[in-house]
Amino acid sequence: MSRTDNATNLDPRTSLDPPTSLDPADWDELRAQGHRMLDDMFDNLATLGERPVWQAPSPAQRARCRAPLPRAPGSLEAAHAQFMADVAPFGSGNRHSGFMGWVQGGGTAVGMLAEMLAGGLDANLGGRDHMPIEVERQIGAWMAELFGFPTDASGIFLTGTSMANFCAVLIARDRALGTEVRHTGIHGDVRVVAYASRGVHSCIVRAMDMNGLGWDRLRLVETDADNRISLPALEAAIAADRAAGLKPFLIVGTAGSVDTGAIDDLSGLADIAAREGCAFHVDGALGALGVLSPKVAPRLAGIERADTLALDFHKLGQVPYDAGFLLARDAAAHKRTFTYSEAAYLRHAERGLAGGEWWPCDYGPDLSRGFRALKVWFSLKTYGLDAIGAVIGRACDLAQDLKARVEAEGELELLAPVSLNIVCFAYKGADNAAIVADLHEEGRVAPSTTTIDGRTAIRAAIVNHRTGPADIAALVDGVLALGRAQVGGR
């Protein structure tokens, strides 16, 4: 019998020959295992409050993730069992109601299901003519409407606002220097300069580095008593740079600073940018989606005047990681910064799969792109914008409750104004970094730390839609107990 004849009689997945496909031999068996995996994750989400917000993996568990390269096949059931035992219980904790560290959303069951569908579809959203591209365009149109941008604005998903900010700085750079800089690079003393507050996220500083202009061409302007960029100081810095022969090309406004949640005077910044001929970019990673909350939206006035806006759906939008987004007022300028028409293998066609009028790879750095838009699309259609806005408003209310509790306790001290959903405070006379580490290890709540005016602050960023008054009480009670143990034991 020939090899060909033999192959017709045997399933290659049960023979000694290499498999011709990675599909299962038994779809019913896979379906049953898939149901068990999905049920486990539903149970995991439903019982978050019964487990610690964070716990450290054991040395043995870490060692099992340093196993030799797997050459031979193994069972999906065994891999799932190891995941449930060694991975799932030891995540970063951001889904837990007691998580208040950094600025991370809590995810949702709907978002999880959408990720499963996106993985099953396995669409590459670099370009071409298929419906997942239309879903991403739909999100772009919705965001343009939400933020008051023109209907022909462009929008694109990226990993997060760090990358979206970088892309925005590139667009502003090319606006100032011309797109020929993409061919020639930056040479000599290019005398352009950008401005942001001292509270701006570090990714803006890194973006100046990565775009070739360098950190020295970013002016970090002093802030006012509310931690917002000082408009008089900004105007003075611009005047000084013009007197020195430099050209201002970009002003970055922050809608929710990373340390304290401060929102810059966006209308004032827009006025200065227009007067000075600068691009106006808003880093809205934390606060931009506050436009959904009637309590927050008035403080974001001026965001609609931005040339570019970066935001994260995986923060206050509660979409699972990752889901950053860049919105650009001038779609043509956006495209000029990223498109490359000389690659024959990316040639657009008039019809067929290679058709389609909008290819995301012409608007960002990635050609290989996952279907990030689907989990946002599902979340918005399932929960609705009003419900997400209510979650944001509630987070801000909880921050005010925490502020009031801190101010009512004589042992505690508020270290910064509470502008949005972040509260920075300290236990007087204690090692507050040690208090935070102890809280993490106790497993009930998990704030983070930052530095305010040279002092270590306990920083509670209330983002998770599951967080409630009991979590706020647990945080304050925990800080008080640990602080008293420290100070009283000296």
Image (cartoon, rainbow, N blue to C red):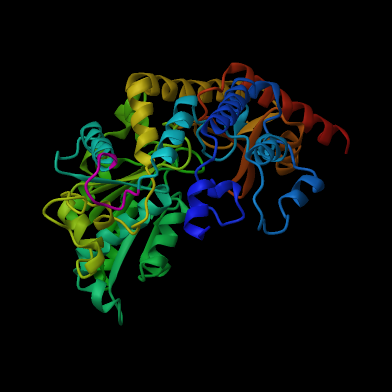
Image point (32%, 29%), residue name? 291
User: Of 37 and 385, which appears nearest the observer?
Assistant: 37
User: Of 99 and 45, which appears nearest the observer?
Assistant: 45
Does 202 sit above or below residue 243?
Answer: above
User: Of 158 and 429, which appears nearest the observer?
Assistant: 158
Highlighted magenta segment, given as a residue range: 124-132
Does 215 sit above or below residue 202?
Answer: below
Name the spot of residue 390 as percent of width and height, x first. Answer: 40, 19
The answer, for residue 408, to whether it is visible in the render is no
Q: Quarter of the image containing the C terminus?
A: top right
Does 343 sit above or below residue 118?
Answer: below
Image point (26%, 70%), residue name? 246
Res 250 quadrant in image: bottom left
Query: What residue occupies the far bottom of the structure in this picture?
Result: 188
Name the spot of residue 289 as percent of width and height, x first. Answer: 36, 33
Res 481 quadrant in image: top right
Q: Is residue 8 left or right of residue 471?
A: left
The answer, for residue 180, to whether it is visible in the render is yes
Name the spot of residue 150 as percent of width and height, x first. Answer: 15, 40
User: Of 30 and 441, which appears nearest the observer?
Assistant: 30
